[in-house]
């Protein structure tokens, strides 16, 4: 295919607006997959099939005949959820245009807005498409108004389709060919290949997704990685059609995959440039590192499984560059990791992928955000290495006496809701320490609200509350908005006066009492009674702000044995000793490991 007959594009949309379904239709109509019961064929991961969401961007090459010419269309399916913006912006680097899909019933949603701006800022051609026009309650004209009002898009440029019923799919392909520019690449120049995705395949080793900018490459070529100078032999080169089909070569303008004799999972860095051995070219600018927003501990359920978990985490992070990893230790859970994620769903999905794709069973602790503090005192500054520190683990927060300023991460959020829910949603935002920045109508019945929130406030249950308040109609999206000065306190928990390090948390002063009460109650309900009273306390600066007592209980396990049977008695005592191995002792209070896990988990 000459470059003029290649189009690289992507489909972007709010979650559930039909990206994967449209991708199915495009694959069918171009004969890439047979017609029939195709359901989101590009969602290949088990976690994607189970949850019905796309997590990884996927690519597929299509061949389509238009006005007697064959075109090569490289489609990149992208995830829509806020946590995966990183994936979206990455795929966009390999594209020249996007299909912006909007549900004809739901209309423009929070992530539609966010995705539009990602494409707009990347200066890509945007093809607006209203999907699901077959629905009984479809309002394509209202939605067209929204698109026009919000994005200043001419209404006559908007296509109206049903991905499910296959209506208007040819028009979509025609628009892709007519409106999206072809790649501006030169095949005569030396090879310049850009890695926009890579992952570890259990059987094939490291697989890289490449966009060829200049030149061409073929199986057997020796290529060098610009960032580490290492040279590899191309073992297999091909296109995604829609699964890996070896083609032997890839030309400028094409998108495909490559396997090389790469042993170490850390070698194929996303954002790297490859060139032919001894013919170096200037590397393309790599990707900005993603900024993790949410941190949590991850530990193996059995300490002996740590090496297994480590190798699983290493392989998975090759495929997901946005995860930050650090070794961590916990007195109760042993050696593990402290991981940084882009959001909660991201964290859940990572956890699920660990289990499903690598058979690793892990314990995940409650998530927290990263706080920043300024400290005084020459000795302290020397000890911490700076007068400004970022605290990822609440236990490592310096003492309040030396802190002059606390700061917490903020987000700029967008909520789109039917106007009838506006009052209760405004209240919900205020309850979560949100500051309303702006409100505007996007059509007669829907409102777009812009709110600034502390990230910590929307981490756990904000989204669920928003959904239930609005009967599922409100949508929500947010992006990083830097740090702001805040009034924070460190919350400690003690059992009979001994501190439980793992439970230490940092929260806003207005939240301290309520949080302390909740955790004390949880402790009371999960720690089994013992032969003495256990006092559970929540404290701020040594001052008790919440308390619960766990009553004493005399546990005489041998009582049931009626004296006589000595072997049974021995067996019971043995069982009890086995159980003790799984305990964490705090002072003289014994906490079974599983109770600990219950408390630490969300
Ligand atoms: P994605 O999250 O954007 O990838 O959305 P999916 O392609 O997974 O679609 C979400 C849901 O909408 C699925 O249940 C689809 O069957 C349904 N859907 C997609 N397109 C249409 C359409 O044109 N009409 C109707 N009625 N349903 C559709
Ligand atoms: Mg999808």
Image (cartoon, helix red, strand yellow):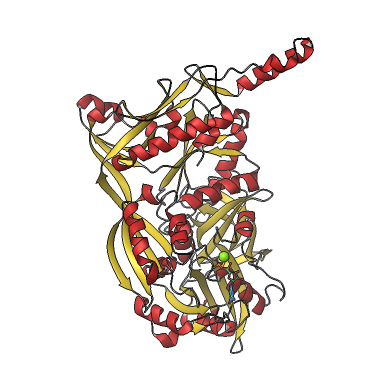
Q: Quadrant of residue 569?
A: top right
The quarter of the picture showing ligand 1: bottom right
Closest to the observer: 311 or 516? 516
The residue sitting at the front extreme is 562
Q: Quadrant of residue 590?
A: top right
Closest to the observer: 50 or 252? 50
- Residue in the picture at 51% in, 83% down: 160
Residue 173, position in %: x, y?
Answer: 56, 81
Q: Is residue 195 visible?
A: yes
- Residue in the picture at 44% in, 56% down: 465
- Residue in the picture at 51% in, 56% down: 274
The relative height of residue 168 versus residue 533 in the rendered view (above or below) is below
Residue 26, position in %: x, y?
Answer: 61, 76
Residue 186, position in %: x, y?
Answer: 48, 71
The relative height of residue 60 versus residue 506 in the rendered view (above or below) is below
The relative height of residue 175 versus residue 452 in the rendered view (above or below) is below
Specify whether 174 is left or right of 475. Answer: right
Closest to the observer: 286 or 31? 31
- Residue in the picture at 38% in, 44% down: 369
């Amino acid at each position: 295919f000459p470059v003029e007959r290649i189009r690289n594009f992507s489909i972007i949309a709010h979650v559930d607006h039909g990206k994967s379904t449209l991708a199915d239709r495009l694959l069918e109509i171009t004969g890439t997959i047979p017609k029939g019961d195709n359901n989101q064929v590009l969602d290949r991961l088990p976690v994607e099939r189970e949850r019905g969401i796309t997590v990884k961007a996927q690519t597929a090459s299509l061949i389509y005949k238009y006005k007697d010419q064959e075109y090569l269309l490289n489609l990149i399916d992208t995830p829509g959820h806020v946590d995966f913006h990183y994936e979206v912006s990455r795929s966009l680097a390999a594209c020249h245009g996007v299909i912006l899909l909007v549900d004809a019933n739901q209309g423009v949603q929070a992530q539609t807005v966010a995705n539009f701006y990602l494409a707009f800022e990347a200066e890509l051609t945007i093809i607006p498409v209203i999907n699901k026009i077959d629905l009984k309650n479809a309002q394509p004209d209202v939605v067209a108004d929204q698109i026009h009002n919000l994005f200043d898009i001419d209404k006559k440029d908007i296509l109206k389709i049903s991905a499910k019923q296959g209506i208007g799919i040819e028009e979509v392909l025609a628009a892709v060919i007519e409106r999206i520019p072809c790649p501006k690449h030169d095949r005569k120049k030396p090879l310049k290949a850009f890695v926009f995705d890579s992952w570890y395949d259990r059987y094939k080793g490291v697989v890289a997704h490449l966009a060829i900018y200049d030149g061409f490459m073929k199986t057997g070529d020796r290529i060098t990685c610009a960032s580490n100078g290492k040279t590899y032999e191309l073992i297999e080169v091909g296109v995604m059609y829609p699964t890996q089909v070896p083609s032997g070569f890839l030309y400028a303008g094409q998108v495909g995959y490559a396997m090389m004799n790469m042993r170490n999972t850390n070698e194929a860095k996303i954002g790297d440039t490859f060139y032919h051995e001894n013919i170096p070219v200037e590397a393309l600018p790599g990707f900005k590192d993603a900024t993790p927003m949410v941190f949590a501990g991850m530990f193996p359920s059995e300490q002996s499984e740590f090496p297994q978990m480590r190798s699983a985490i290493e392989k998975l992070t090759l495929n997901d560059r946005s995860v930050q990893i650090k070794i961590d230790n916990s007195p109760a859970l042993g050696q593990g990791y402290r991981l940084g994620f882009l959001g909660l769903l991201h964290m859940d999905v990572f956890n699920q992928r660990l289990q499903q794709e690598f058979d690793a069973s892990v314990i995940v602790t409650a998530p927290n955000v990263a706080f920043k503090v300024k400290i005084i005192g020459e000795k302290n500054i020397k000890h911490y290495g700076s007068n400004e520190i970022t605290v990822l683990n609440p236990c490592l927060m310096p003492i309040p006496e030396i802190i002059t300023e606390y700061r917490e991460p903020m987000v700029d959020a967008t909520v789109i809701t039917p106007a009838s829910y506006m009052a209760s949603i405004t209240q919900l935002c205020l309850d979560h320490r949100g500051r309303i920045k702006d409100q505007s109508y996007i059509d007669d019945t829907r409102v777009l609200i812009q709110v600034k929130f502390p990230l910590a406030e929307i981490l756990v249950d904000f989204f669920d509350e928003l959904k239930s308040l609005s009967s599922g109609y409100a949508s929500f999206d947010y992006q990083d908005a830097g740090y702001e000065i805040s009034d924070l306190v460190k919350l400690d928990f003690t059992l009979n006066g001994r501190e439980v390090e793992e439970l230490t948390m940092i929260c806003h002063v207005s939240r301290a009492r309520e949080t302390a009460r909740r955790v004390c109650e949880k402790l009371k309900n999960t720690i089994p009674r013992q032969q003495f009273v256990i006092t559970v306390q929540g404290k701020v600066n040594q001052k008790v702000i919440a308390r619960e007592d766990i009553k004493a209980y005399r546990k005489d396990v041998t009582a049931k044995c009626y004296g006589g049977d000595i072997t049974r008695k021995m067996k019971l005592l043995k069982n009890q000793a086995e159980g003790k191995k799984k305990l964490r002792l705090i002072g003289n209070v014994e906490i079974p490991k599983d109770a600990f896990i219950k408390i630490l988990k969300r």
